[in-house]
Image (tube, rainbow, N blue to C red):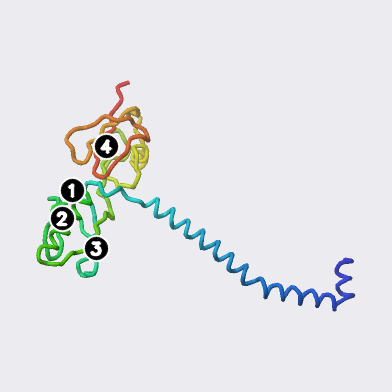
Amino acid sequence: MRFAASWKANPMGYRAILAVVSVLLLLFGPALSSANSQEAGGATQSLGAKTATSNAVPDAGYSLGTGDKIRVNVFGQPDLNGEYVVDGAGFVQLPLVGPIKAAGLTVTDFQKQVIAAFSNGFLVNPNIDVYVIDYRPYYIMGEVNKPGPYAYVTGMNLITAVALAGGYTTRADKSDVYIRRNGSAKEVELPADETTNVNPGDIVRVAERFF
């Protein structure tokens, strides 16, 4: 109450303080706004970097297979750019050059095949990028609650794969798992933990325990 009364008793002092505050805002307001913008921009950039990292794909040594979806960019030739799926026969159908074998090739080797095909009477020294945008699904079967095909997620391990399949049944053997890698006809027995990676095209089998 005394504080309020003092302002009413001295209105000129009140106006003087308001004037000083206004001047300070004019002098330092833009700098504060710029600093806040830079801080927000830095946070956004950091988030973008984390997102890019989280969406990182396997390296160029990844072997393509049926169901993989790839992007082909032919620089300077936008009409030739496109997205393609490796078909059941293991080929990718490209404009001008037709089908090119992809299944079993690494991304780098397939890229070399594409460059060679376009260099054969179509383009001079073509600059071509190839990368995977969607990986073929993996399959999980046996003692899980929801067996079937699932979309591959970068960095997936067995624990994640089982969780997506609804978890183990009460009869599941939770110590080991059997995986057929990359279309192989032979199963490999591996630990049923986070050290076992699951790759695109893998067939994962969770066995039944015997006791």
Q: CA distance from mark 1 to mark 3?
A: 18 Å
Residue corresponding to mark 1: 105
Residue corresponding to mark 3: 73
178 w.r.t. 152: above or below: above
104 and 84: which is toward the camera: 104
Check disc 3: other Cα within 10 Å, few if <14, some if 14-19, many if 20+.
Answer: some
Q: The residue tagged with tag 3: helix, strand or loop?
A: strand
Q: Amino acid at mark 3?
A: Asn
Circle number at residue 204: 4
On screen, residue 146 versus residue 110, left or right, reads right
Check disc 1: other Cα within 10 Å, few if <14, some if 14-19, many if 20+.
Answer: some
Tell me whether circle 2 and circle 3 mark residues in contact (CB < 8 Å).
Answer: no
Q: Quadrant of the N terminus?
A: bottom right
Residue corresponding to mark 2: 113
> Extreme front residue here?
125
Check disc 4: other Cα within 10 Å, few if <14, some if 14-19, many if 20+.
Answer: many
Q: The residue tagged with tag 2: helix, strand or loop?
A: helix
Q: CA distance from mark 4 to mark 3?
A: 34 Å
Q: Amino acid at mark 4?
A: Val
Check disc 2: other Cα within 10 Å, few if <14, some if 14-19, many if 20+.
Answer: some
Q: The residue tagged with tag 4: helix, strand or loop?
A: strand
199 and 97: which is toward the camera: 97
Tell me whether circle 1 and circle 2 mark residues in contact (CB < 8 Å).
Answer: yes
- Give the residue drawn at x 21%, y 48%: 106
105 w.r.t. 78: above or below: above
